[in-house]
Image (spheres, rainbow, N blue to C red):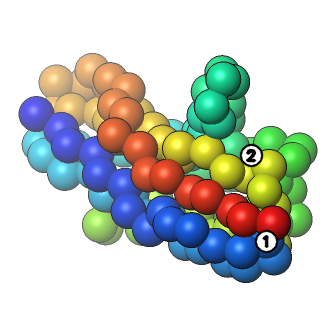
Amino acid sequence: QVQVLESGGGLVQAGGSLRLSCAASGSILRINRMGWYRQAPGKQRELVATISSDDNTNYADSVKGRFTISRDNAKNMVYLQMNNLKPGDTAVYYCNTDVMFSSGRSYLYWGQGTQVTVSS
């Protein structure tokens, strides 16, 4: 069983910063791609940023230059540093991990989400 737990959300004023953390735990051999997604009220879930096992990153155009994704493979963790936040960034942020097991199979796991609210 794998658990994925996000933390670090909260309320911040426009222009402020937050750092989200996500920890995966369980009988994990290796984590391949890790990523952050978000879902605002009334909207579909959208990709924010992803990072591969060899640290190749990908960002949504709306967050390029403001958000930075990073990971710590030894701790099975992924981070999202969010700077210069805007009210449009308000959403529930979800962590997504592609976990590989000793069997050689891999599965996607989602966290429960953490709320980020940016006030104007």
Residue for point 32% across, 25% down: 106
Residue 9, given in percent of the width and then of the height, sits at 48, 63
What is the number of the mark on residue 14? 1
The quarter of the rendered structure image containing the C terminus is bottom right
**Looking at numbered disc 2 in the image, what kind of residue is underneath it?**
Asn
**Looking at numbered disc 1 in the image, what kind of residue is underneath it?**
Ala
What is the number of the mark on residue 75? none
Residue for point 69% across, 62% down: 118
The answer to whether one can see residue 73 in this image is no
Could you say whether the residue bearing mark 1 is in a helix, strand or loop? Answer: loop
Residue 65, given in percent of the width and then of the height, sits at 87, 65
Residue 19, given in percent of the width and then of the height, sits at 55, 72
Up-down: is 89 above or below 72?
A: above
Name the mark nearer the viewer: 1 or 2. 1
Could you say whether the residue bearing mark 2 is in a helix, strand or loop? Answer: strand
Crowding near pointer 1: few (<14 within 10 Å), some, many (20+)?
some
**From mark 1 to mark 2, how far is it between C-alphas?**
24 Å
What is the number of the mark on residue 58? 2
Residue at the extreme bottom: 16
Residue for point 31% across, 67% down: 74
Up-down: is 77 above or below 113?
A: below
Front residue of 102 and 86: 86
Up-down: is 96 above or below 59?
A: above
Q: Quadrant of residue 105?
A: top left
Front residue of 15 and 4: 15
Residue for point 25% across, 25% down: 104
Please indicate whether residue 14 sits to the left or right of residue 44 in the image. Answer: right
Residue 31, given in percent of the width and then of the height, sits at 37, 44
Residue at the extreme front: 120
Up-down: is 42 above or below 8?
A: above
